[in-house]
Image: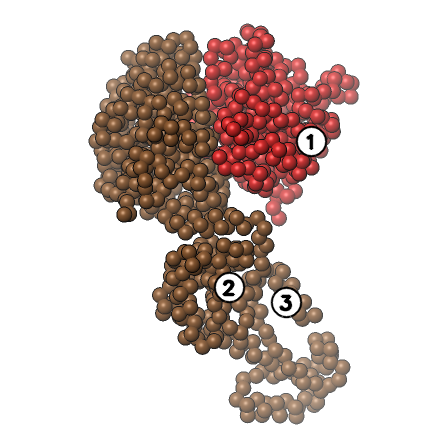
Chain colours: A red, B brown
Amino acid sequence: MDQSTTVKKIPLILVTGFLGSGKTSLLKQILKEIGSSRKIAIVQNEFAPGRVDSVELQASGVPFDLLEINNGSVFCACLLDDFISRLAEFIRTYQPEAIFLEATGLADPVSLAQVMQTPEVTKYIFLGGVWTVVDCLNFDKSHQYIQRVRHQIQIADIILLNKTDLAPPEDKLINQLLEWNPFAQQFRTQDGLFEELNNVLLNSLDLQYLLSQKLSLHREVVFPAKSEPETEGSLLKPFSLPRPDIGSCVIRSQKIFTEQSIRQFHSENKGYIYRMKGYVRSTEGKYLLIQSVFDHLEINYTDHWSGPTELILMGPGVQPGAITREFLKSGKNG
Amino acid sequence: MMMNGKERIRKAFKVQAVDRIPWIPFVGVHGAFLAGYKADEYLQSADFLVNGINKAVEAYQPDGIPVCFDLQIEAEALGCQLAWSPDNPPAVISHPLAGGKSLDILPKFEKSSGRIPLVIEATKRTRAAHPDIAIYGLITGPFTLALHLLGTDIFMMMFENPDYTNELLAYTVEISRQMAGWYLEAGCDVIAVVDPMTSQIGPDHFEQFIHEPISSLYKYIRENGGLSSFFVCGHAQQNIEVMCKTGPDNVSIDENIPLDYVRDICKRYGISFGGNLQLTLVLLMGTAEDCQKHALECIDTAGETGFILAPGCDLPMTTPVENIQAITTLVHDPYQRDVVRALEKTAEEMPILDLAEYGRTEKVIVDIITLDSESCAPCQYMVEAVREVTPHFEGLVEWREHSIKNLDGVTFMSSLFVKNIPTICIDGKISFVSQIPPKQELIRAVQKRINEKLKLKIREKHGKIVLAGTREELKEIYDKAKIAILELGAHIEIETISGEEARRLYGISQTPAWINVRNRIKSEGTEPSIEVMREWIKALL
């Protein structure tokens, strides 16, 4: 019997951000926060001489399982085929409850998420979210001009404004981020630490919790007060909440879709797609910014995207092959 | 007139008419997979590279082929440390200019540096072995090489020290120029300037820093008789127009940029373009059918002129060979494109038939799956071949054509798991694929099936007699039965069982009893599905 049929999938959180933005610091804080109560695994494909990042993580003293990937190239996620088998083996061996994947600063996170759609790993994991760390100190100077930084921000669920102690974010920065990605939650952090970290983790790792909150849109999430006596200090316990059997899928397509076709797709599939977000290539060179949570679908036109359609879908009925075929049926070739 | 691959590529680069779409599978470390090496050993041996290329040419019949897809060759020769991998090209892990060090510290770049001698040797040998296909020399683009040398500091340097950035790019483009010259000398037709990191900057920075050096590089390539291609991967849509303005002969892109967008801009600039087969989801993880469907989408979007069908980048090492071969078939066989189109049109509403027991009729059934024998020449010849041989069998053979231009044909094709057109199935078994069989071979195949059916029939008729009763009751019957069998010249087994056993097995209430038992062979040499077994069991109830 295929083991996958009995194993509930675990969330994989993609941690992105340009080099030096503070991804490893964030991971250290996450380990401190939940590393002793949850079996956490970290996957790093940041390739640095002397394994600086992994050494730094290990210095935190909190137990975790680590998989280091040398994907051979910072350019192409397409060269990640060996990564799949290593990740699957890693999950089978260590059976973590959650995985944080720290992508290289120049990696294309959507390609990375797409590569993980292979059946070998989708039976174990679903994409629990994309967290992007923004370097406030260097944002104005250069980072906002690097296309990958922008891309990472645009597809984020959570944006962490790091180094705020060194460079408090100005309205200009906040507005720029909002313009690029109005749906992501923004948090201010110092060395990866922020007050709401535990709640954000709860939200991302225990999807059942999220589902029970009857949320409309992601950014409107209202977290339980951290000081509630029954939950204080122990919001996250091993298997504290049941995990639904969730699937996730990344659709990248060069086809052209209309607002109407997206609404129809959502309406026909909302029963088993809990979340849908991303950018859709539409007619006359325009792009649609899409965000749905349960029944609620929001579509806006945006000037801040170019390229193919990139959509991330999540839900109990999301099987990459079938849902992609269903979605693509409604598109037309350019 | 039929062109060879080199002519086809040259025409396509010049946006001139070609006899068919040119096709280039970008075989890099996939060559190691084809020839049975690890990526690291493959990229460090001229012999292994040549073996891999030869395997790729044989398997994929391309119009052009790269010698070595490794963007770390120049960086390594200039002192960057590499981390080698058995499954991927190496990664640069140290940047000698990190922090903005002077360019003077870099070693002299020579034809004898690093792995350059081995790639040049591999180029010469590939040229000699494959004179009719276009040989691509891939060089690291100046911006990507600058990033290798300086690290990500380059993004900061563009703001804080534009003079240093310009100096560095003037240096790296000189490296690119030298590499291009050596590749051209060794016999390359095309120099592909692979500069994926330009996708990280916007058009303003591109024009400020990249335009001039890279334009001079294309001019140099052209003056030295080569064709030039600007390879970019990643989200580089914002830069397509400024890339065209640098004057390459061709722009090659990956799946991150819509092909129709590139088509429209390149057409405006009179530049050819190539790409953008999806590497991961389709070529690596998809099926052969997915690959053909997707390749056809690319061809249909791009149009027939000034387009080169190619993957968006270096093929992943373990890309299934049958997937790339399926694209080769699509490119070389125009009928296959019609087949893919026809299948796509009808696939959605198609039911699948259970043909597990197809071919149990008295006659032998020959099914020919065609696109349409009136419009597809190979289909027509195949149908004619079958039509010609059937009279030899005097009514024992019946043939039918199933055109996949209609739903019934597609259903039949899919239900029999037929993948290619035209195909002959004899009693539901795929017998001849794509090739028209010689008359005698077809006769032999049909005759073989007739013989099989006859054998099966004879064996099915082979039954036994079961006599039930006590020894005394059966003594006389048994002897008489033996005489009767002898007189008939038959070979039939007689089995005796007790009355009690007869009651249990055959529901007999009185003895002596005679029972004729016929064994019916339901399957032989195959493992029937559980559904089929269930049906057979039901027949016994």
- The one nearer the camera, B482 or B129, is B129
Residue A62 screen position, x and y as percent: 60, 22
Q: Can you tell which quarter of the image residue B205 is in?
A: top left
Residue A154 appearing in the image? yes
| Chain letter for mark 3 | B
| Chain letter for mark 2 | B
Q: Secondary structure at mark 3?
A: helix
Earlier residue among tags 3 and 2 = 2
Residue B376, which numbered label? none
Q: Can you tell which quarter of the image residue B225 is in?
A: top left
Distance from the alpha carbon under mark 1 to that under mark 3: 48 Å
The three-letter amino acid code for the residue at tag 3 is: Trp
The residue at 56%/33% (across/down) is: A257
Q: Is label 1 in contact with label 3 (beta carbons under 8 Å)?
A: no
| Chain letter for mark 1 | A
Image quarter where the C terminus of chain B lies is bottom right
Residue A294, which numbered label? 1
Q: Which residue is mark 3?
A: B536
Q: Which residue is mark 2?
A: B428
The residue at 73%/77% (across/down) is: B507
Residue A326 screen position, x and y as percent: 59, 41
The residue at 39%/58% (across/down) is: B378
Q: Is label 3 in contact with label 2 (beta carbons under 8 Å)?
A: no
Q: Secondary structure at mark 1?
A: loop
Distance from the alpha carbon under mark 3 to that under mark 2: 20 Å
The residue at 62%/64% (across/down) is: B533
The three-letter amino acid code for the residue at tag 1 is: Phe
Residue B279 screen position, x and y as percent: 45, 37
